């Protein structure tokens, strides 16, 4: 799914993805008045790429840039709300490969996933080491395709419930990567594919 990038554009390719744009909007929505430097550090992108991303988001009227920092505009907040994706810093240990782990919760999307293989393939294609997908079905945390985490691994279930705050029908994708940036971008890319 392409949210912001114009595939017909000319010039050098962007060094950021739609996942970066999502992460940018989400962090700015939570931390009003962020600087370019702070955003660069959070996203793991160079300041030049962040500058280009800012210009693109300004062009779509999603953010406001002032001397006091960058804030999200109502249109940006509406995009975040309509996507139904939120992030969570979560570690599930050996259930996901990679030195760094990052999660994305997708609201009311469990009917769009089958066994988690598609999500794993997207994560690997994005540069991640792998992922595991869970759903909330009838109040139970299920690791796809059909492993009841509440029954078999109650401590993992407790961690997922605490960190992900999943509602009925929600999906949790936890991606792993060699860096925090890879894990973040991989998880969000897989989440965007579900909407």
Image (cartoon, rainbow, N blue to C red):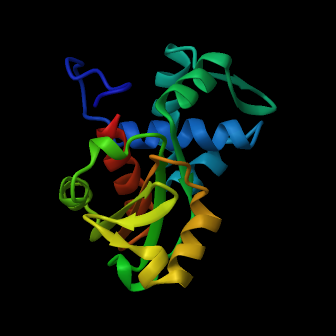
The image position of residue 71, as x and y in percent, is 71, 29
How many numbered circles does the render carry? Answer: 0
Position of 119 with respect to 28 (left or right) is: left
- Residue most extreme to the right: 68
Name the quadrant containing residue 25: top right
The image position of residue 159, as x and y in percent, is 58, 74
Q: Is residue 43 visible?
A: yes
- Residue most extreme to the front: 138
Q: Is residue 92 visible?
A: no
Q: Can you say which quadrant of the picture contains the C terminus? A: top left
Instruction: Work out whether 100 lies above or below 68.
Output: below
Name the quadrant containing residue 147: bottom left
Instruction: Work out whether 46 lies above or below 62.
Output: below
Between 169 and 80, the one lying in front of the other is 169
What residue is rendered at 40% in x and 42% in y? 19
Between 158 and 46, the one lying in front of the other is 158
Position of 82 with respect to 69 (left or right) is: left
What residue is rendered at 28% in x and 31% in y? 1
Name the quadrant containing residue 17: top left
What residue is rendered at 45% in x and 70% in y? 101
The image position of residue 96, as x and y in percent, is 35, 76
Position of 162 with respect to 17 (left or right) is: right
What residue is rendered at 55% in x and 40% in y? 24
Instruction: Work out whether 32 lies above or below 101.
Output: above
Instruction: Work out whether 133 lies above or below 70.
Output: below
Between 171 and 118, the one lying in front of the other is 171
The image position of residue 166, as x and y in percent, is 55, 54
């Amino acid at each position: 799914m392409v949210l912001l990038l114009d595939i017909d554009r000319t010039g050098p390719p962007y060094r950021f993805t739609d996942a970066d744009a999502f992460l940018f909007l989400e962090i700015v929505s939570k931390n009003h008045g962020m600087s370019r430097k702070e955003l660069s550090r959070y996203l793991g992108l160079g300041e030049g790429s962040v500058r280009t991303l800012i210009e693109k988001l300004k062009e779509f009227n999603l953010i406001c840039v002032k001397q006091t920092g960058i804030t999200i505009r109502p249109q940006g907040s509406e995009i975040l709300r309509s996507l139904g994706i939120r992030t969570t810093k979560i570690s599930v240990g050996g259930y996901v490969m990679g030195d760094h782990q990052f999660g994305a919760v997708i609201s009311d999307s469990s009917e769009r996933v089958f066994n988690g293989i598609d999500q794993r393939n997207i994560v690997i294609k994005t540069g991640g080491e792998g992922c595991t997908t869970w759903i909330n079905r009838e109040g139970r945390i299920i690791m796809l395709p059909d492993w009841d985490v509440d029954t078999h691994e109650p401590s993992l279930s407790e961690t997922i419930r605490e960190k992900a705050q999943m509602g009925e029908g929600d999906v949790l994708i936890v991606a792993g990567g060699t860096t925090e940036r890879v894990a973040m971008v991989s998880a969000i890319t897989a989440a965007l594919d579900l909407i």
